[in-house]
Image (cartoon, grey):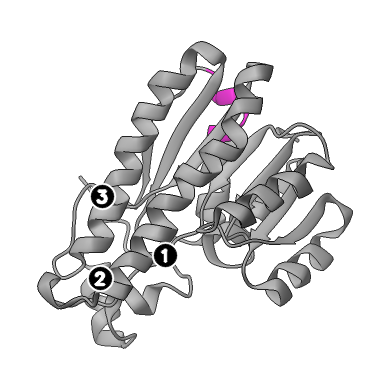
Amino acid sequence: MRLQDQIAIVTGGASGIGAGIVRRFVAEGARVVIADRDAPAAAALAAELGPAARAVVADVTSADSVAALAAAAAALGPLDILVNNAGVGHRPQPLEELPEAEFERVLAVNVRSIYLTARAFVPAMKARRRGAILNIASTAGVSPRPRLTWYNASKGWVITATRSMAVELAPFGVRVNALNPVASETPLLATFMGEDTPEVRARFLATIPLGRFATPADMGHAATYLCSDEASMVTGVALEVDGGRCI
């Protein structure tokens, strides 16, 4: 029960990596707000996990929606943990061919959302002089794959923002870290691969020394450590959970 009685928000928490983190946090004693645009999926996960989980419909690219999320979370008490997990990718393609609308969507979900949640939640954490923020980046921000340039760049931004936030917020007792997952068994996997076939999977797996994709449970365990008091001396870290991919 490493997160006993702590209050957490996980954006994009209804599926994939976010759901893995939500499940682990609840198992470790936290009360968790599942913030997601997919209302039915968020409600289903909250029902599965019981009274420790609460679903809140939120669009983290909207300042008004993030403000509403903050108000809903405040009903549970002061926020201890913020996980910026919501993210999108784009299909592999030459960098000059990605449509502008898709580029803007990647930046809005992967980048702007972290700015908006920081504005909404950091002031209270600073005032309390405690808190843990976890941003979900990617190995793409460290070891980019070709034809995913704008996704790679967005995750590189997340890593740099994490380190800068960590330095600025450390005097206030607020820790900020990131996770760099390798390709994971989530709904986004097919997007990154372009197509989900045994041949494409084999090519991806050949780049991961441990020989498997990551899972939401892997991310839940790593997130629990970074957001718990066990990591009280850890800030500004972008932890690769990648089976050796970035070595």
The residues tagged by marks 1 and 3 sit, at their Cα atoms, a distance apart of 15 Å
Q: Amino acid at mark 3?
A: Gly
Task: Return the residue nearer the eye: 123 or 1.
Answer: 123
The residues tagged by marks 2 and 1 sit, at their Cα atoms, a distance apart of 11 Å
- Reading the chain from its start, which is encountered first: label 1 or label 3? 3
Disc 3: which residue: 141
Q: Amino acid at mark 2?
A: Phe
- Reading the chain from its start, which is encountered first: label 2 or label 1? 1
The residues tagged by marks 3 and 2 sit, at their Cα atoms, a distance apart of 17 Å
Disc 1: which residue: 184
Residue 20's spot in the image, x, y percent?
Answer: 60, 58
Q: Is residue 31 visible?
A: no
Which secondary structure, mark 3?
helix
Q: Is residue 206 above or below residue 33?
A: below
Q: Amino acid at mark 1?
A: Ser
Q: Is 27 covered by the magenta stretch?
A: no
Kindly give the residue lying farthest to the right in the view shown. 51
Q: Residue at x 72, y 76 (%)?
A: 40
Asked whether disc 2 touches disc 1, contact meaning CB atoms under 8 Å apart, the reply is no
Task: Return the residue nearer the eye: 17 or 37.
Answer: 37
Q: Is residue 232 above or below residue 46?
A: above
Q: Residues within 10 Å of mark 2 (few under 14, many from 20)?
A: some
Tag of residue 204: 2
